[in-house]
Image (cartoon, grey):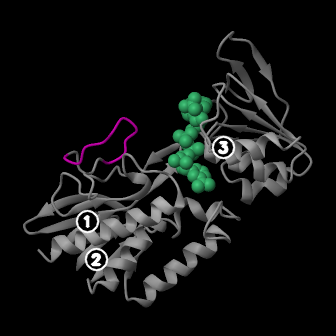
Amino acid sequence: MPDSKFDVIVIGAGITGLTAAKLAAQSGLATANIEALLFGGLVININELDGEPHGSGTELASNLMMEVSDLGVANIAETVTALAREGDLLSVATDAGRHRARAVIIASGAQLRRLGIPGEAEFEHKGVSQCADCDGPMYKDEDVVVVGGGDSALQEALVLANFCKRVHLVHRGTKYRARQHLIDAVAARNNIYPVWNTVATRVRVRNVLDGATTEIPCTGLFAYIGLEPRCEFAPPEIQRDANGGLMTDASLRTAMTGVYAAGAVRAGYGGLLTHAVAEGDAAARALTAHLRG
Ligand code: NAP
Protein backbone atom coordinates (compact mmCIF):
# COMPACT_ATOMS: atom_id res chain seq x y z
CA MET A 1 0.00 0.00 0.00
CA PRO A 2 2.50 2.67 -1.08
CA ASP A 3 1.45 6.33 -0.62
CA SER A 4 -1.98 6.21 0.99
CA LYS A 5 -3.90 8.73 3.10
CA PHE A 6 -5.86 8.26 6.34
CA ASP A 7 -7.32 10.34 9.17
CA VAL A 8 -5.22 8.46 11.69
CA ILE A 9 -2.18 6.23 11.56
CA VAL A 10 -1.44 4.15 14.64
CA ILE A 11 2.15 2.91 14.70
CA GLY A 12 2.34 -0.41 16.53
CA ALA A 13 -0.14 -3.27 16.93
CA GLY A 14 0.45 -4.22 20.54
CA ILE A 15 -2.40 -3.94 23.03
CA THR A 16 -2.07 -0.14 23.19
CA GLY A 17 -1.97 0.32 19.42
CA LEU A 18 -4.85 -2.07 18.77
CA THR A 19 -6.96 -0.38 21.46
CA ALA A 20 -6.23 3.05 19.96
CA ALA A 21 -6.99 1.85 16.40
CA LYS A 22 -10.25 0.28 17.56
CA LEU A 23 -11.43 3.45 19.26
CA ALA A 24 -10.40 5.72 16.37
CA ALA A 25 -12.27 3.51 13.89
CA GLN A 26 -15.32 3.40 16.15
CA SER A 27 -15.26 7.22 16.10
CA GLY A 28 -15.64 7.09 12.33
CA LEU A 29 -12.03 8.00 11.48
CA ALA A 30 -10.28 6.33 8.53
CA THR A 31 -7.60 4.44 10.44
CA ALA A 32 -4.48 2.49 9.55
CA ASN A 33 -2.37 0.38 11.89
CA ILE A 34 1.25 -0.19 10.89
CA GLU A 35 3.25 -3.02 12.51
CA ALA A 36 6.50 -4.61 11.37
CA LEU A 37 6.29 -7.66 13.64
CA LEU A 38 3.49 -10.00 14.66
CA PHE A 39 0.49 -8.18 16.21
CA GLY A 40 0.05 -8.30 20.00
CA GLY A 41 3.43 -7.07 21.22
CA LEU A 42 5.21 -8.57 24.25
CA VAL A 43 1.97 -9.86 25.79
CA ILE A 44 1.72 -12.71 23.27
CA ASN A 45 4.61 -14.42 25.10
CA ILE A 46 2.46 -14.80 28.24
CA ASN A 47 0.45 -18.03 28.50
CA GLU A 48 -1.44 -16.97 31.62
CA LEU A 49 -2.12 -13.29 32.17
CA ASP A 50 -1.48 -11.96 35.67
CA GLY A 51 -4.89 -10.55 36.72
CA GLU A 52 -7.77 -9.41 34.50
CA PRO A 53 -8.59 -10.42 31.84
CA HIS A 54 -7.89 -14.13 32.40
CA GLY A 55 -6.50 -16.29 29.62
CA SER A 56 -3.46 -16.03 27.41
CA GLY A 57 -1.88 -12.96 25.89
CA THR A 58 -2.38 -14.44 22.44
CA GLU A 59 -6.13 -14.80 23.01
CA LEU A 60 -6.40 -11.22 24.20
CA ALA A 61 -4.43 -9.85 21.26
CA SER A 62 -6.21 -12.04 18.67
CA ASN A 63 -9.66 -10.94 19.86
CA LEU A 64 -8.64 -7.31 19.71
CA MET A 65 -7.06 -7.77 16.29
CA MET A 66 -10.30 -9.31 14.96
CA GLU A 67 -12.36 -6.40 16.31
CA VAL A 68 -9.96 -3.93 14.69
CA SER A 69 -10.10 -5.73 11.33
CA ASP A 70 -13.91 -5.96 11.46
CA LEU A 71 -14.03 -2.19 11.95
CA GLY A 72 -12.22 -1.73 8.64
CA VAL A 73 -8.84 -0.61 9.98
CA ALA A 74 -6.13 -1.03 7.33
CA ASN A 75 -3.47 -3.37 8.73
CA ILE A 76 -0.16 -2.53 7.12
CA ALA A 77 2.77 -4.92 7.68
CA GLU A 78 5.70 -2.55 7.16
CA THR A 79 8.57 -1.11 9.18
CA VAL A 80 8.26 2.58 9.98
CA THR A 81 11.48 4.42 9.23
CA ALA A 82 10.57 8.10 9.67
CA LEU A 83 7.86 10.50 10.75
CA ALA A 84 7.69 14.07 9.44
CA ARG A 85 5.32 16.95 8.88
CA GLU A 86 4.24 17.53 5.28
CA GLY A 87 2.08 20.64 5.02
CA ASP A 88 -1.16 20.01 6.95
CA LEU A 89 -0.47 16.29 7.09
CA LEU A 90 1.96 13.94 8.80
CA SER A 91 4.00 11.63 6.65
CA VAL A 92 4.96 8.15 7.86
CA ALA A 93 7.75 6.64 5.77
CA THR A 94 8.17 2.86 5.79
CA ASP A 95 10.43 0.28 4.18
CA ALA A 96 7.76 -0.09 1.47
CA GLY A 97 6.52 3.43 0.81
CA ARG A 98 4.86 6.40 2.47
CA HIS A 99 1.52 6.89 4.24
CA ARG A 100 -0.02 10.19 5.25
CA ALA A 101 -2.51 11.08 7.96
CA ARG A 102 -4.01 14.03 9.79
CA ALA A 103 -2.82 12.61 13.10
CA VAL A 104 -0.53 9.83 14.36
CA ILE A 105 -0.45 7.75 17.53
CA ILE A 106 2.95 6.25 18.30
CA ALA A 107 2.26 3.01 20.15
CA SER A 108 5.31 1.10 18.97
CA GLY A 109 6.00 -0.39 22.39
CA ALA A 110 9.30 -1.60 23.75
CA GLN A 111 11.63 -4.52 23.44
CA LEU A 112 13.33 -6.50 26.17
CA ARG A 113 16.73 -5.09 27.02
CA ARG A 114 19.76 -7.30 26.42
CA LEU A 115 22.52 -7.95 28.92
CA GLY A 116 25.26 -7.20 26.41
CA ILE A 117 27.58 -9.91 27.71
CA PRO A 118 29.85 -12.23 25.70
CA GLY A 119 28.01 -15.19 24.19
CA GLU A 120 24.52 -13.67 24.56
CA ALA A 121 24.00 -13.12 20.82
CA GLU A 122 25.96 -16.22 19.78
CA PHE A 123 23.84 -18.55 21.97
CA GLU A 124 20.45 -16.98 21.28
CA HIS A 125 17.89 -19.81 20.98
CA LYS A 126 20.68 -22.22 21.91
CA GLY A 127 20.52 -21.64 25.65
CA VAL A 128 19.80 -17.92 25.75
CA SER A 129 16.10 -17.01 25.69
CA GLN A 130 13.70 -14.21 26.62
CA CYS A 131 10.49 -16.24 26.53
CA ALA A 132 9.89 -18.56 29.49
CA ASP A 133 6.52 -19.79 28.25
CA CYS A 134 7.93 -20.62 24.78
CA ASP A 135 11.23 -22.19 25.81
CA GLY A 136 10.71 -23.33 29.43
CA PRO A 137 9.69 -26.92 28.49
CA MET A 138 13.09 -27.38 26.77
CA TYR A 139 14.74 -27.02 30.19
CA LYS A 140 12.66 -29.63 32.00
CA ASP A 141 14.48 -30.86 35.14
CA GLU A 142 17.48 -28.68 34.35
CA ASP A 143 19.02 -25.61 36.03
CA VAL A 144 18.45 -22.17 34.50
CA VAL A 145 19.45 -18.61 35.37
CA VAL A 146 17.00 -15.69 35.27
CA VAL A 147 18.50 -12.19 35.49
CA GLY A 148 16.53 -9.23 36.87
CA GLY A 149 14.46 -8.14 39.84
CA GLY A 150 11.34 -6.56 38.28
CA ASP A 151 7.88 -7.95 37.47
CA SER A 152 9.14 -9.60 34.28
CA ALA A 153 12.00 -11.51 35.92
CA LEU A 154 9.90 -12.79 38.80
CA GLN A 155 6.89 -13.63 36.63
CA GLU A 156 9.07 -15.57 34.18
CA ALA A 157 11.03 -17.27 37.00
CA LEU A 158 7.69 -18.57 38.30
CA VAL A 159 6.86 -19.98 34.85
CA LEU A 160 10.29 -21.65 34.61
CA ALA A 161 9.96 -23.08 38.13
CA ASN A 162 7.11 -25.23 36.78
CA PHE A 163 9.54 -27.03 34.46
CA CYS A 164 13.06 -26.65 35.79
CA LYS A 165 14.92 -28.33 38.58
CA ARG A 166 16.39 -25.07 39.89
CA VAL A 167 15.85 -21.46 38.85
CA HIS A 168 18.70 -19.19 39.97
CA LEU A 169 17.26 -15.69 40.19
CA VAL A 170 20.26 -13.38 39.77
CA HIS A 171 19.63 -9.81 40.90
CA ARG A 172 22.13 -6.98 41.09
CA GLY A 173 20.53 -5.55 44.29
CA THR A 174 19.09 -6.78 47.57
CA LYS A 175 15.49 -5.77 47.00
CA TYR A 176 13.17 -6.77 44.18
CA ARG A 177 11.27 -3.96 42.50
CA ALA A 178 8.55 -6.44 41.43
CA ARG A 179 5.07 -6.25 42.90
CA GLN A 180 4.54 -7.93 46.27
CA HIS A 181 2.33 -10.80 45.09
CA LEU A 182 5.11 -11.91 42.72
CA ILE A 183 7.73 -11.62 45.48
CA ASP A 184 5.53 -13.75 47.77
CA ALA A 185 4.94 -16.33 45.04
CA VAL A 186 8.69 -16.59 44.36
CA ALA A 187 9.42 -16.98 48.09
CA ALA A 188 6.90 -19.81 48.26
CA ARG A 189 8.68 -21.86 45.57
CA ASN A 190 11.38 -24.18 46.86
CA ASN A 191 13.17 -24.45 43.51
CA ILE A 192 13.78 -20.69 42.97
CA TYR A 193 17.13 -19.65 44.43
CA PRO A 194 17.74 -15.90 44.79
CA VAL A 195 21.32 -14.81 44.08
CA TRP A 196 21.63 -11.25 45.44
CA ASN A 197 24.04 -8.41 44.64
CA THR A 198 25.12 -10.22 41.54
CA VAL A 199 25.37 -9.56 37.81
CA ALA A 200 25.71 -12.02 34.96
CA THR A 201 28.98 -12.05 33.04
CA ARG A 202 28.75 -15.28 30.95
CA VAL A 203 26.67 -17.17 33.49
CA ARG A 204 29.79 -16.75 35.42
CA VAL A 205 28.37 -14.24 37.91
CA ARG A 206 30.13 -11.48 39.84
CA ASN A 207 29.07 -10.17 43.26
CA VAL A 208 28.79 -6.38 42.92
CA LEU A 209 29.83 -5.79 46.55
CA ASP A 210 32.98 -7.90 46.97
CA GLY A 211 33.81 -8.67 43.30
CA ALA A 212 33.87 -12.45 43.88
CA THR A 213 32.99 -14.49 40.77
CA THR A 214 31.20 -17.84 40.77
CA GLU A 215 29.98 -20.06 37.96
CA ILE A 216 26.40 -21.31 37.99
CA PRO A 217 26.14 -24.55 36.02
CA CYS A 218 22.97 -24.23 33.94
CA THR A 219 21.63 -24.88 30.47
CA GLY A 220 19.46 -21.79 30.04
CA LEU A 221 19.84 -18.04 30.59
CA PHE A 222 16.77 -15.77 30.67
CA ALA A 223 17.41 -12.02 30.99
CA TYR A 224 14.56 -9.71 32.07
CA ILE A 225 16.32 -6.48 32.89
CA GLY A 226 13.82 -3.94 31.66
CA LEU A 227 12.46 -2.52 28.45
CA GLU A 228 13.85 -0.34 25.64
CA PRO A 229 11.30 1.88 23.85
CA ARG A 230 11.09 1.22 20.08
CA CYS A 231 10.94 4.68 18.52
CA GLU A 232 14.11 5.23 16.42
CA PHE A 233 11.88 6.66 13.66
CA ALA A 234 10.49 9.49 15.83
CA PRO A 235 12.08 12.89 15.04
CA PRO A 236 14.24 14.69 17.63
CA GLU A 237 11.58 17.35 18.20
CA ILE A 238 9.76 14.68 20.25
CA GLN A 239 11.85 14.69 23.41
CA ARG A 240 12.95 11.46 25.17
CA ASP A 241 13.54 10.71 28.85
CA ALA A 242 16.76 9.07 30.09
CA ASN A 243 15.43 5.61 29.17
CA GLY A 244 14.57 6.72 25.61
CA GLY A 245 10.80 6.93 26.27
CA LEU A 246 8.84 9.59 24.34
CA MET A 247 7.73 12.55 26.43
CA THR A 248 4.08 13.65 26.34
CA ASP A 249 1.77 15.93 28.29
CA ALA A 250 -1.06 14.53 30.41
CA SER A 251 -3.23 14.18 27.28
CA LEU A 252 -0.51 12.01 25.67
CA ARG A 253 0.35 14.76 23.14
CA THR A 254 3.97 14.97 22.07
CA ALA A 255 5.70 18.24 21.16
CA MET A 256 4.91 17.52 17.48
CA THR A 257 1.39 18.79 16.71
CA GLY A 258 -1.01 15.95 15.87
CA VAL A 259 1.34 13.25 17.18
CA TYR A 260 0.46 11.30 20.34
CA ALA A 261 2.44 8.62 22.17
CA ALA A 262 0.95 5.86 24.30
CA GLY A 263 1.98 2.64 26.06
CA ALA A 264 5.44 1.19 26.60
CA VAL A 265 7.08 3.62 24.15
CA ARG A 266 6.05 6.56 26.36
CA ALA A 267 8.07 8.03 29.23
CA GLY A 268 6.17 7.45 32.47
CA TYR A 269 4.20 4.43 31.25
CA GLY A 270 2.88 2.37 34.19
CA GLY A 271 3.74 -1.07 32.76
CA LEU A 272 0.56 -3.04 33.49
CA LEU A 273 -1.90 -4.38 30.94
CA THR A 274 -4.56 -2.04 32.32
CA HIS A 275 -2.23 0.90 31.57
CA ALA A 276 -1.65 -0.36 28.01
CA VAL A 277 -5.40 -0.37 27.35
CA ALA A 278 -6.08 2.91 29.18
CA GLU A 279 -3.35 4.76 27.27
CA GLY A 280 -4.49 3.48 23.86
CA ASP A 281 -7.97 4.58 24.73
CA ALA A 282 -6.90 8.00 26.07
CA ALA A 283 -4.68 8.77 23.06
CA ALA A 284 -7.47 7.92 20.61
CA ARG A 285 -9.95 10.10 22.53
CA ALA A 286 -7.55 13.05 22.67
CA LEU A 287 -6.75 12.71 18.98
CA THR A 288 -10.42 12.48 17.99
CA ALA A 289 -11.15 15.68 19.93
CA HIS A 290 -8.15 17.34 18.25
CA LEU A 291 -9.32 16.38 14.74
CA ARG A 292 -12.82 17.61 15.48
CA GLY A 293 -11.39 20.93 16.53
P1 NAP B 1 12.00 -3.21 35.26
O1 NAP B 1 10.81 -3.01 36.14
O2 NAP B 1 12.65 -2.04 34.66
O3 NAP B 1 13.05 -4.05 36.09
C1 NAP B 1 14.30 -4.35 35.54
C2 NAP B 1 15.10 -5.14 36.55
O4 NAP B 1 16.33 -5.52 35.95
C3 NAP B 1 15.42 -4.34 37.81
O5 NAP B 1 15.33 -5.16 38.93
C4 NAP B 1 16.88 -3.89 37.55
O6 NAP B 1 17.63 -3.81 38.74
C5 NAP B 1 17.42 -5.03 36.73
N1 NAP B 1 18.47 -4.61 35.80
C6 NAP B 1 18.45 -3.57 34.93
N2 NAP B 1 19.59 -3.52 34.23
C7 NAP B 1 20.36 -4.53 34.65
C8 NAP B 1 21.63 -5.02 34.29
N3 NAP B 1 22.36 -4.44 33.32
N4 NAP B 1 22.12 -6.10 34.93
C9 NAP B 1 21.39 -6.69 35.90
N5 NAP B 1 20.15 -6.30 36.28
C10 NAP B 1 19.64 -5.24 35.65
O7 NAP B 1 11.64 -4.15 34.01
P2 NAP B 1 10.55 -5.30 33.84
O8 NAP B 1 10.54 -6.23 34.99
O9 NAP B 1 10.77 -5.86 32.48
O10 NAP B 1 9.16 -4.51 33.85
C11 NAP B 1 8.96 -3.46 32.88
C12 NAP B 1 7.53 -2.91 33.06
O11 NAP B 1 6.59 -3.91 32.67
C13 NAP B 1 7.24 -2.58 34.51
O12 NAP B 1 6.42 -1.44 34.53
C14 NAP B 1 6.48 -3.78 35.01
O13 NAP B 1 5.59 -3.49 36.08
C15 NAP B 1 5.73 -4.20 33.76
N6 NAP B 1 5.41 -5.65 33.80
C16 NAP B 1 4.16 -6.01 34.21
C17 NAP B 1 3.84 -7.35 34.28
C18 NAP B 1 2.48 -7.75 34.71
O14 NAP B 1 1.57 -6.94 34.68
N7 NAP B 1 2.30 -8.98 35.13
C19 NAP B 1 4.78 -8.32 33.95
C20 NAP B 1 6.03 -7.93 33.53
C21 NAP B 1 6.35 -6.58 33.47
P3 NAP B 1 17.40 -2.64 39.84
O15 NAP B 1 16.11 -3.00 40.52
O16 NAP B 1 18.60 -2.74 40.68
O17 NAP B 1 17.30 -1.36 39.05
Between the residue at mark 1 and the residue at mark 2, the CA separation in whole angstroms equals 11 Å
Q: Is residue 286 above or below residue 243?
A: below
**Residue position for label 3:** 180
Mark 1 highlights which residue? 92
Judge left or right: residue 206 versus residue 13.
right
Q: Magenta region: which residues?
A: 237-246
Q: Neighbour class for label 2 at 10 Å: few (<14), some, many (≥20)? A: few
**Do the residues bearing badges 3 and 1 touch, measured as CB atoms within 8 Å?**
no
Circle 2 residue: 2
Residue 249 visible, this orientation: yes
| Mark 3 CB lies closer than 8 A to ligand 1 | no
Judged left or right of residue 228, residue 180 is right
Quadrant in which residue 42 is drawn: bottom right
| Image depth: mark 2 or mark 3 in front | 3
Q: Are marks 2 and 3 in contact (CB under 8 Å)?
A: no
Assign a secondary structure to mark 2.
Answer: loop
Residue 116 in percent (x, y) is at 57, 33
Q: Secondary structure at mark 1?
A: strand
The crowd level at tag 3 (other Cα within 10 Å; few <14, some 14-19, many 20+) is few
Crowd rating for badge 1 (residues with CA inside 10 Å; few <14, some 14–19, many 20+) = many
Query: Where 79 sits versus 200, above or below?
Result: below
Find residue 179 and report its horizontal and vertical position in percent.
Answer: 62, 45
Q: Nearer the viewer, residue 46 or 277?
A: 277
Ligand 1 lies in which image quarter? top right
Q: How many marks?
A: 3
- Residue in the foreground of this view, choosing between 226 and 52: 52
The tag earlier along the polypeptide, 2 or 3, is 2
State yes or no: residue 108 in magenta. Answer: no
What kind of residue is marked 2? Answer: Pro
The disc, 1 or 2, on the residue closer to the chain's N-terminal end is: 2
